Amino acid sequence: MDVSGNSRPSGQGSRAPEVCEAPEWADLQLHGIRLRLVARLVLRSGTIPATSRRVLCTHHHRRPVSPDARPGRAGGGLRAPNRGATHDLHTFPGHPENNSGHNWDLRPDTGAFGAGVLAGWSEAGDRPDFKIVTGISTGSLQATFAFLGPEHDADLAALYTRTSTEDIYTERDLLSALLRESMWDTAPLQRLLERHITSELLDAVAARHARGHRLFVGTANMDTDAFTIWDMGAIASSGRPDRLERYRQVLLASASIPVLFPPVYFPVQIDGRTYHEMHVDGGIQAQLFLRGFMLDIIDGIERERRDAPSEWSVYLIRNGWINEAIVRDVVEPSSIAIASATIDQLVELSNDASLFRAYMLAERRDLDFHLAAIPDGAFPGFDALRFDTGAMQELYDFAYNAARTGYDWEARPPSLDRREWVRP
């Protein structure tokens, strides 16, 4: 199976564009309502943008994915991360110190929280040398720098305190937004990634991968409704001429908010024909992720190091509020208002489920659990997709100072029944 570095559907197997008929105004209005509802869903999930562009009425070979083309197979000659995990067990050298896993759950402008925690943690002098790092949404970019170590703290600080809205996206006019795959154009974000994700950076990722560290990024495969986990170290180490573009494309896909931002298409070959898998922001399926195969890797390390007992820890940084209250006026008796309120509640439950799943996996394997999040009630008024550099700097400084003096990590998730009421 081969994958090109192009995020747009193209090449063998692509159909010629079909004629697009002008939509009726009523259809446009209905389409706009759907856009607003889906946009509310992804904004409540807390993610950040990415890029790829395609006209709505242009069709390509997008048949249902066969059993031989399941999620993770869009890596060309690279092993799918889940399938290759058992092979990786014997590649980890034994290092008894600082054996930790790190998991990133990120929102757009509140990503400054995680960047500040990392930098302050480094300053405190007790930041672990993470063995496994996972990231989703904008966390995929932050995870890359966390994976590489404290020497990249300054890069993270710059990204999350100096990046403005104009560095991320531009808005389309209404008609273009209704007829295209997305409401906004994220070419600025792609240029931002091109500046920061370089060949030298991938060489550093590959070097740590060779020493037994692992970096995973999550995307959502819209064609299979499956959560896809990418082994970023394998991509960086692959030696493929398009490894840099592939790495960037996965980061873009992981951060590509459906409807607001274009999806990323990964070409795959099946029976000699090219098809295109649609991948978007992994945050629509999981707000953070820790999976069993990652813990199997830990078991493999322990077997390789029989006479070197170690203590493993899981660190989760949520760039958001765990007990975030949904504050709204009385829900109006209209279909749009009710749908919006329903989406809010579903996303909050998804947040809880992702966190609780990670906690239970850690408990099952007797791993120390550590959780950081923005304190409830702190920093109100963040606009989900307006990058206010002043507010981001304030949040960064808060997190930095909290971590520099010894962050007060939560040892378990907060109560998950906080919204339940028993009434007579």
Image (tube, grey):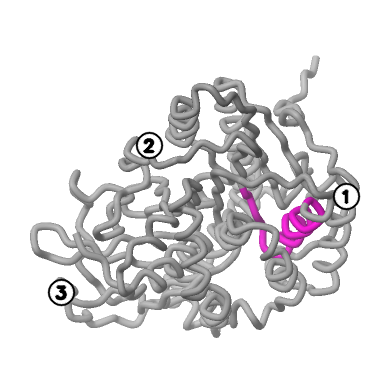
Residue designated by label 2 = 90
Circle number at residue 387? none
SS at badge 3: loop
Neighbourhood count class around disc 2 (C-alpha, 10 Å): few under 14, some 14–19, many 20 upward: some
Viewer-side residue, 26 vs 327: 327
Q: Amino acid at mark 3?
A: Gln
Residue designated by label 3 = 12
Q: Give x and y (percent) for residue 365.
A: 55, 22
Viewer-side residue, 225 vs 331: 225
The span from disc 3 to disc 1 (Cα, nearest Å) is 53 Å
Left or right: 351, with 248 as reference point: right
**Where does the N terminus fall, quadrant-wise?**
bottom left
Q: Give x and y (percent) for residue 225.
A: 37, 47
Q: Earlier in the sequence, mark 1 or mark 2?
A: 2
Q: Amino acid at mark 2?
A: His
Q: Which residues are magenta?
A: 104-121
Residue designated by label 1 = 402
